Image (cartoon, rainbow, N blue to C red):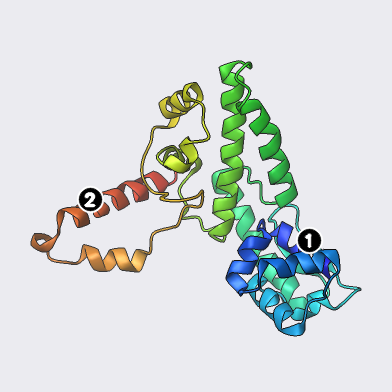
Amino acid sequence: MYEIYCNLRDSRGVKDARVAEATGIGKSTFSDWKSGRSVPKQDKLKKIADYFGVPIEYFSNSDNGLITCKDCGLMYDSSYPNDVEEHRHQHEAWKRAVDKFGQLYCYYPECEKTKTENRKISQNTSLPLNQRLDAQIEIFKCLFSRSVMENNFDLNHVPFDVYVSMLLGNSTINQDLETDLKELLVQKYGTRTGISYGTVYHIPNMHENTVAAHKDGDNFTLEELEKIEEYKKLLIAARPKG
């Protein structure tokens, strides 16, 4: 069972700590399962299954048909028709996103390998700056892919160049960049707000912004006007080129 859980966890790109926080299962419990000191009870398995959106039978069927798509990144059970259909819909959404945004690293092992290999290059200050720049851009492509995937391949996600400019406006990301590399990236992409924490861009709620836009213009606060202006810039940036 634990191996099945690990495969499911890794395919979704999450850690035990995140699963523990979301399900309320103690972190030490995962360690006990790993070491064999205890086995998962049904109530905990149900919480994990609900968190990942899979049937609880995933963890009890030793002859399961679990498959992880190496393109769209979705893990599904080929023995469950509903799962197969869900994968078909997600795969179609993935293809549309690729058509719009270009290559996406959605298969978790490939994404992590690409990030690790390119991080070694981007952080090696003895290498030419342009080589380090190309490596860092590849890392950003991995982060961008994860962001698009987290948004269910929604085509309203901002394009790659806008996404990178948001990352460069995020102090959390900037802490990992050498000064010379950061300056070159800023020259290429600029900076803007839009990602307050982490690396995932959250598509604005269109309904909330529509309500705000219908308020009386004389009643707007300065903060509201700044938010509306920023949202307008994001919409413009997300429009297809050409």
The structure residue drawn at horizontal position 42% and vertical position 49%, both measured from the top left corner, is: 195
The quadrant the C terminus occupies is top left
Q: Which mark is residue 226?
A: 2
**Residue 119 on image: x %, y %:** 64, 33
- On the rendered structure, is 137 left or right of 213? right
The relative height of residue 151 versus residue 164 in the rendered view (above or below) is below
Q: Position of residue 220 (x, y in %)?
A: 14, 60
Residue 195, above or below 78: above
- In the image, taking residue 125 as reference, residue 196 lies left or right, namely left
Badge 2 element: helix
Label 1's element?
A: helix
Residue 77: percent from left, percent from top? 79, 71
Q: Position of residue 84 (x, y in %)?
A: 75, 71
Identify which amino acid the numbered label 2 is placed on.
Glu
Examine the image and state in which quarter residue 89 appears: bottom right
Nearer to us of marks 2 and 1 is 1
Mark on residue 7?
Answer: 1
Name the quadrant containing residue 44: bottom right
Q: Earlier in the sequence, mark 2 or mark 1?
A: 1
Residue occupying the point 63% across, 46% down: 104
